[in-house]
Amino acid sequence: MVVSEGDQEIDGELESALELDIRGEVCPYTYVKTRLALEEMAVGQVLRVLVDYEPATRNVPRSVTLQGDEVLKVEAIGEGVWAIWIRKRNPSI
């Protein structure tokens, strides 16, 4: 699991984002590691999660939405690799 910081453009706005690279992981670990990263973030920060397990493109967004966070977008960024953009909204987690 690799977490790094950087500036990313989301819908025309430059946002400071953390990046979580969990390629090679499968569900439920994709969600668990995403949740752990979100717990360390402040409300309003953006997390970009990289996955290479296609079911995670549905499972992670569904789970984080149920926890009260906002999925900004899910996009294919290469063959068999996706980025899931999440804005932390839930202050209690």
Image (cartoon, helix red, strand yellow):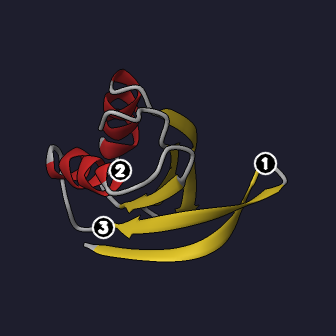
Which image quadrant: the C terminus? top left
- Residue 78 position, x and y percent, is 54, 67
Between marks 1 and 3 in the image, the one whose residue lies nearer the viewer: 1
User: Could you say whether the residue bearing mark 1 is in a helix, strand or loop?
Assistant: loop
**Quick one: 87 or 90, which is closer to the camera?**
90
The residue labelled by disc 1 is 11
Instruction: Give the residue displayed 31% in from the left and 44% down from the top.
Output: 56
Circle 2: residue type: Leu
The first of marks 1 and 3 along the sequence is: 1
Crowd band around label 3 with a 10 angstrom C-alpha radius: few (<14), some (14–19), many (20+): some
Q: Which mark is residue 38?
A: 2
In this rendering, position of residue 48 left or right of residue 58: right
- Residue extending furthest toward the top: 66
User: Could you say whether the residue bearing mark 3 is in a helix, strand or loop?
Assistant: loop
The CA span between labels 1 and 3 is 24 Å
- Residue 46 position, x and y percent, is 55, 53
In this rendering, position of residue 76 left or right of residue 34: right
The first of marks 3 and 2 along the sequence is: 3
User: Could you say whether the residue bearing mark 2 is in a helix, strand or loop?
Assistant: helix
Q: Is residue 82 visible?
A: no
Instruction: Give the residue displayed 50% in from the left and 58% down from the top.
Output: 48
- Residue extending furthest toward the left: 28
Circle 1: residue type: Asp
Which image quadrant: the N terminus? bottom left
75 w.r.t. 67: above or below? below
The residue labelled by disc 3 is 23
